Image: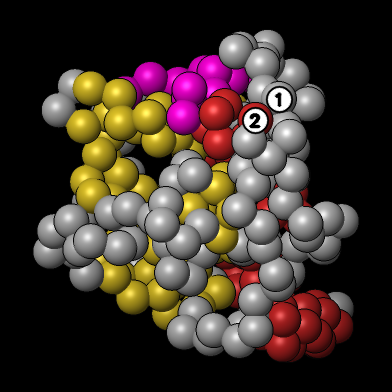
Amino acid sequence: MKSRTLMIVASLMAAMMASEAPAQSSGARPATTASDVAPSVRNRAVPEKYKRRMVRFSTNEAPGTIIVDTHNKFLYYVEGKNRATRYGIGVGREGFGWSGVVKIGRKAEWPSWTPPAEMRRREAARGHILPAVQKGGPDNPLGARAMYLYKGGRDTIFRIHGTNQPWSIGLNLSSGCIRMMNKDVEHLYSRAPVGTKVIVIGPGNKHGDVAFEDRGIDILRTLFGG
């Protein structure tokens, strides 16, 4: 029985490692469009590397910190020494990327969406009429949960939120918000309270002196938890 268990674990490890692309890999990216609400890439399967994983992770940041690597499209929730949960994300398209150190100022389940006036004008020019406010629900662009990012006690207008477009994970499509699959944003939402420190590493180098290293999947914790 022990031998059989080891064989199963080894097989699962091989499959997971084969699907794991290096964080530094760039490769060809699917074509995108400038629209926030009608991107051209649809029904794209989420690549395996963006599935939620427990990883071996080193950083100078305290447990409970969120680190967002916009270049590699990963969000990390730091759990302790050499431990983090890694989530795949979608991030801002060219011209909408940003960096900085913020905090979760408030949270909402199945949030309503109030598109900024600038976005409404931009989309109207492309023939997409957005509502002034859209109630929360499965069709809402903010998905199942939203964590509102604040700086100095003020809303930055950026959020970590779910999405009704899961195929957008791994792409640069948003207006600067951090998108997650609904099941992942629900998982993170339950762990990250208001006040959580969020470090966004992106254009501008305004994230301060943060160091981290993703050392790859923690196979046993991913398979068996803990």
Residue 153 visible to the viewer: yes
Q: Position of residue 208 (x, y in %)?
A: 13, 58
Residue 186 visible to the viewer: no
Q: Position of residue 175 (x, y in %)?
A: 49, 44
Badge 1 is on which residue? 129
Which quarter of the rendering shows the C terminus? bottom right
Q: Position of residue 24 (x, y in %)?
A: 46, 84
Q: Which amino acid is tagged 2?
A: Ala
Q: Secondary structure at mark 2?
A: helix
**Which residues make up the magenta segment?**
105-118
Q: Who's the residue at 38% across and 20% down the image? A: 106
Q: Who's the residue at 14% across and 28% down the image? A: 152
Residues tagged 1 and 2 counted as in contact (Cβ below 8 A): yes
- Of residues 88 and 174, the one drawn nearer to the viewer in this rendering: 174
- Of residues 174 and 19, the one drawn nearer to the viewer in this rendering: 174
217 displayed left or right of 157:
right
The image shows residue 136, relative to residue 81, as above or below, that is above
The quarter holding residue 1 reads bottom right
Badge 2 is on which residue? 124
Q: Residues within 10 Å of mark 2 (few under 14, many from 20)?
A: few
